[in-house]
Image: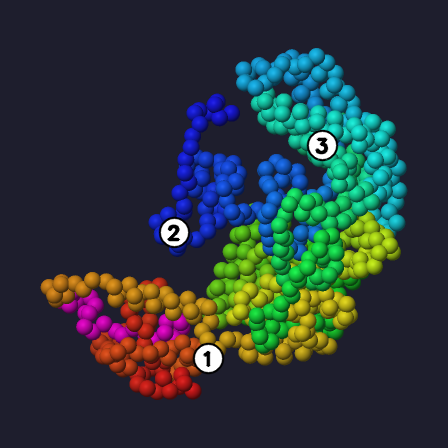
Amino acid sequence: LQRRKGPARTAQVPHPERSKPAAARELPDIEDFVQSASSERLCPFHFARELQTQSEVLFMPYNYLVDPAMRRALNISVAHDVLVFDEAHNVEKACAEAASFDLGPSDFAGAVKEIDRVISLASSGAADADGEEGCTAPEEGEAGAWLSMRQLVLDMEVAIAGLPLRPAPQGGSPRYTGDGLALHALLAPLNITAETSDAVIAMCDDAGKKLVQAARWGSSAHHLRRFADLLRVVFGAASEPSTYRVCVTEAAELSGAAGRGAATASKGARRMLGYWCQDPGVGMRALVAGGVRSVLLTSGTLSPLGSFASELGIPFPHRLENPHVIRAKQILVGVVPSGPSGVELTSKFTHRETPQYKAELGNALVNVARLVPQGVLVFFPSMAALSGAAEQWGKRGSDGGPTVLERLEKHKRVIIEPRGQAEVAPVIERFKEHVAIAERTGVGGAVLFAVCRGRLSEGVDFSDSACRAVVITGLPLPPVYDPKVALKREYLDVCRRHSTGRLSGHEWYDQQAMRAVNQAIGRVIRHVRDYGAVLLFESRFKLPKYREGLSVWLRAHVRMFDQFGQVAVALPRFYREATPDGPTPEQRRLAEAVAQRQSVSQAAPTAPARQRENLQCRPAVPVASAPAPPPLLDVLQAARGQTSRCAPLRAPPQQQALAALPTPKGEKHEQQPRQQQQPPPPPPLQTLQQPRLQQATGCGGGPEPAKRART
């Protein structure tokens, strides 16, 4: 391919901050790397693969490490390495999914098409048609071997279609289930056993090489490689059939190319084969077996640590669980079992779909939007619950009054988490814009409706004013009728009967919900000076087992509110006491902007005397009689559209402390004499050109403002 496009090229990608000294450069992120590599006409993906052999620190997603097929494809070696998993609460799920497989109609159809392409190459000798070096001529009888492979794939699909589907014990769609040995029994009549599986795997790998060498079909043997990976897991040396469950269900209706391809493989056979690992330790033990030196797991939502370590199946001799860095006055955690009218707040399926519950939840959120400043995050247990509530809140009642969404809009802008990945970033930006306006003006804000386990529940930084409260509207329990959930609970109950110290199926089920809750709650506190409230709008949090599932740093702060009126009293008091004594982040940013302009003004070269005289002769703005720079509080209030020229200021303590800055040597507290003409009101911050901050916080000068600041 490179020879077709031209001679080979070599280049060095410059550092994005190459103008700075090496010690002052920041680590480039993935966007910087892609931009720099593209500017040199290099493929960022393959260039990163070349650099990984020379790098000492590699950043990658979970599946690059825990998935053995991905490690082989990317040539990643973990021998003698230290592995650090950040946000490690996802490691358990990632390890189980990396050792699991799903094969559907499109996979069978794709494998048949890939074999047909290889047969065409073997029959016509097309592998040498393009004159590529390294391509070998087809061997005698090779086409017949591939015809047998093709029939093997079709027979496997027919065997899966012949399995009896039975109704699930706890409801849900009909399915066939069994342990890992059930798949061995299914493949044995097809002559796919531990002894013959290596030959089938070798043929699948050979198909990929032939298609790549031909370079005329546009893709490699992706579907055949999936078959090979499945056989490696089923018949591998480290295979543990007792830790797997087989599940066969009717495939969902396919459309487009996938549906047309499925119809060509086997008429009428439209089933999904799932070979699911129930023990995450299988994937983690395989990773450690590669010669790893150490494994470090870090997250704020790993508790309880004992059960988490037992699920991963490897020893963790060193465990550390720390309290939070904040003080008690910076966090409020409240359990709110009922709304303003006394209706129970719970997300049980039979209750959350009633109009009474949705109306009560909407009224409670309106009060929260009224009492909480700036930004509020509201998390729903599922996207279906969010969509149903938003639809109900957009309808008017029988009295024709405003809807719940209209009442919310009176206090804060309502923003809803989108379903598409491409829309997430614009939504976050719009949310933070409304919060920034509220931070400057002191009114308004935004409320963001999101979903637990969604894109906005982790990995997004909602610090300071972006999140002054998190509201949990229910327990995000996994869907009970999902085959994966049902089989996992069944597997854990079997293990619990044979060994002590293991989680039961019900305990695991509740633990999954609490980890999602803790992850969403983690949006409220992002650094040592941050503060916010956590409101649990779920009556089941009155039970000790759910409160004990909260993170350790939250448990000591939990308060029970028997009536919603207690929340309306506690929230204003909390925000009065939690507000830091120093300047707010917005005030610090304003002060830094003014200080930067001051340094730029002082560093400017002095004009010659003749130029100064010419400037003084200009009639527009005489330099000698220019108005004095306004105090910092005037700057803050000018940004809010206010003025302090005519009335004394009553600033909060943090603003007074910020205003009481030391006066530069030789500078008087009194303001400069004003011109005879009344000066215009203070301009906005972005147009200020004054070089210094004044100490005065009132209308006049003198020591009185400083005295008030000390008070």
Magenta stretch: includes residue 693 = no
Mark 2 and mark 3 residues within 8 Å of each other at the beta carbon: no
**In magenta stretch: residue 620:** yes
Earlier in the chain: of badge 1 and badge 2, it is: 2
Q: Secondary structure at mark 3?
A: helix
Residue under pointer 3? 228
CA–CA distance in space, label 1 to label 3: 69 Å
The image quadrant that residue 672 belongs to is bottom left
Side (left or right) of 390 relative to 33: right
| Residue that carries the numbered disc 2 in the rendered image | 22
Q: Amino acid at mark 1?
A: Pro
> How would you rate the neighbour count of disc 1 (Cα within 10 Å): few for under 14, some for 14-19, many for 20 or more?
few
Camera-side residue: 568 or 178? 178
User: What is the quadrant of residue 404 in the picture?
Assistant: bottom right
Vertical order, 656 against 179 (above or below): below
- The first of marks 1 and 3 along the sequence is 3
Of the pair 323 and 690, the residue shown nearer to us: 323
Specify the amino acid type for callout 3: Ala
Residue 268 percent across, percent down from the top left? 81, 29
Disc 1 versus disc 2: nearer the observer: 2
